[in-house]
Amino acid sequence: MQFYECDITFKGSEKKSILSVMSRVAKRNWGDEIIQDLNENFLELQEDIAILIYRAKIIESRQIGEFSLVIASDFLQRITDANLIKILEKIFAESRYVFENVTIKSIKEVTPLQVQKCISSAEQADFLTYRTRWARGNLNQHENFSLSYYNNDEFKIEEKLLDDKKLSLAQALKKAKKLMADKSFIEELQRIYSAENPKKFCGHPVHYKLSAKNSQGAKQLADLLCRALYENKRLIGRCSGCIYEITEACYREPDLESIFEQSAGNTIIIELRGSKDEHKNYASCYEEVVNFFEELIKKNQQNTLFILVETTENPGFAPKLIQTLQEDIYLVEVSEGTGNRVEALNYLKDLVKQNKVKIEDSELENLLGDKSTFRPSDLHKIYDSILRDSLRNNTYTAYKKASRLMLVKDEIIGKDAYQRLQEMIGLTEIKTLINQIIGNAKIQKIRSEVGLEQQKTSMHMVFTGNPGSAKTTVARLLAEILSKEGILKTGEFIECGRADLVGKYVGWTAPAVKRQFKLARGGVLFIDEAYSLVEDKEGLYGDEAINTIVQEMENHRDDVIVIFAGYPDKMKKFLERNEGLRSRIAFHVDFPNYNAEELLQILQLMAKNKGFSLDTEIEKKCLEIFKKVYGKQDFGNGRFVRNLLEQALLKQSQRILTENEGKEIGRAELLQLKADDFDVNVVSQYSGGKTNIGFKTTV
């Protein structure tokens, strides 16, 4: 259904003309009864269109009358001046009034919200009888027609009209590139503009799943997609309604049924993240919502375009709904992509220009930080911070000099990922491997430049080592390093385990595995304690997970690096279980336990990053501690060192307060650690001594 506002003018000289009648009764509230009569007549004479006069005026000196109309059309075609004139002439011919020289002054498409405002104007002018109050009841055959859904507590809706400017394929592709759209999006634009398609509306052959990191990144892509479809007459109307913040109680909501019922010819965008970020088990708490949306989408799929938005930051009930729909709805997946620093800078420039925010290009460059690859969603976050600063500095200027709460950051946060890796203690093998990978990438680039074929290699890995040996930390740094070097497209790091990969029921496991690969696209998928996938009595689902992982490793060999991690002995047995898995792993990296001297170096580095220095007495004492606990069962390596330092800092806090009771505490004292501060709980756990809980007190 499309909605329009229209102004018409008419003239007349005959005594029975509408203009003459209105002129004669002008002194006694001329419009009410006549307009009510016409509005009722409009509603009765057409099955697929409703017309309402919401404003009227007469210019007696020029013998001209003017009606402002609002139109709801259920024709699956766009209303033009020519076909509207035919409709009006048919209606006026049945009227008891004579209309002469009817002219369309203007006509434009509007949103349902604007229609609701026009209806309110008609009600205030008393232009409606009870029978013609169509916003409150039925619109002919539409049982669920309603425009009163804007304050619903179970969901929110945002409606907008697409830009109606001409959009060629070249312009669409240029815009997509500026928006850093993924290859899948580019390919869909080319299909939309294909000469093989008819340039008329015949129903929707496909619908879309749009993937982005957050909803901001998805909105611009959805707009461009709809504009391309409208340009190619795949959409009748320009109205796009985005439904979001959907609660788990929205099922069987009449307002939603109304929206779906009257959106034929237009677009419904549904954000599937739900209403609350804290929801975890969407499979159960949103089950009825999934069933409700499934029913509505299937019922209306022929004439209404659906764009289902899955945000990777919070996918909500997207996996379950899409899995449910995929058998009955032909879904094409499109997604946001990535861009380099130049593209990211231009993207930010466009955002600030559109919203008239003043900021220097050099400042925008600084806000990009050290990253080399960006998603549109990342840039929207940066823009949000720019907007906040602009409000404070340029609008609410009283806050210009207000002190901001700032917590002291660790030194390590500002360092480049490669530099942080090089500063880590030991890890010679992984450092060498990363240098080889970077070197190989540079050589492949040179080969391409001189016309030689690139030799692509698999980079899936196995990390083996005991807890605290830095497997996860190194994997995170690896994703950042390879992204900056241009080897990985996004640098995404997705960490998962058995709970993320193995479904509870038949048919859930394969989609769960595929979803993790999609989240990790362009980055690293880190599967911790991978052997837990098959370490249970009900091994069927675990084997399905492994088989799907092997398949997806092949499908995504160019855009996802999979790293399996775990204990050495268990990982060996795990790999022996599946030859296909073992054959796809290119690198096996062992993370050995740290010795006492290396543990001391780790402690020194951790303390330095927190602003502390360790004197000779502390180092001597801690080295003795490390020699005693090194090699003990379940020893935590780097985790033990971190726990030791954190507990020492807790004890330092108690000591400083006790020693300086009633005195002012200076900076030097806050940054000074003593050997006695390291007599802490974590040491006694491995030495067999008595475990003390809490703080030591001095009497």
Image: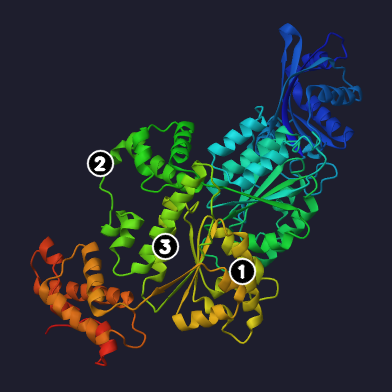
Asked if residue 431 is positioned above or below residue 261 in the image, the reply reads: below
Question: Which residue does the numbered mark 2 point to in the structure image?
Answer: 401
Pick the residue in front: 67 or 369: 369
Q: Quadrant of residue 696?
A: bottom left
First-in-chain label (3 vs 1): 3
* Colour mode of the rendering: rainbow
Q: Which amino acid type is shown beneath numbered disc 2?
A: Lys
Question: Which residue does the numbered mark 1 point to in the structure image?
Answer: 550
The answer, for residue 252, to whether it is visible in the render is no
Q: Which amino acid type is shown beneath numbered disc 1?
A: Val
Q: Is residue 571 left or right of residue 465?
A: right
- Frontmost of labels 3 and 1 is 1
Query: How far, Cα to Cα, is label 1 from label 2?
Result: 57 Å
Q: Is residue 536 left or right of residue 620?
A: right
Q: Secondary structure at mark 2?
A: loop
Q: Secondary structure at mark 1?
A: helix
- Frontmost of labels 1 and 2 is 1
Label for residue 476?
A: 3
The answer, for residue 39, to whether it is visible in the render is yes
Q: Quadrant of the C terminus?
A: bottom left
Residue 382 is situated, as x and y percent measured from the top left of the image, at 42, 45
Q: Alpha-carbon neighbours of circle 1 within 10 Å: few (<14), some, or many (≥20)?
A: some
Query: How far, Cα to Cα, is label 3 from label 1?
Result: 22 Å
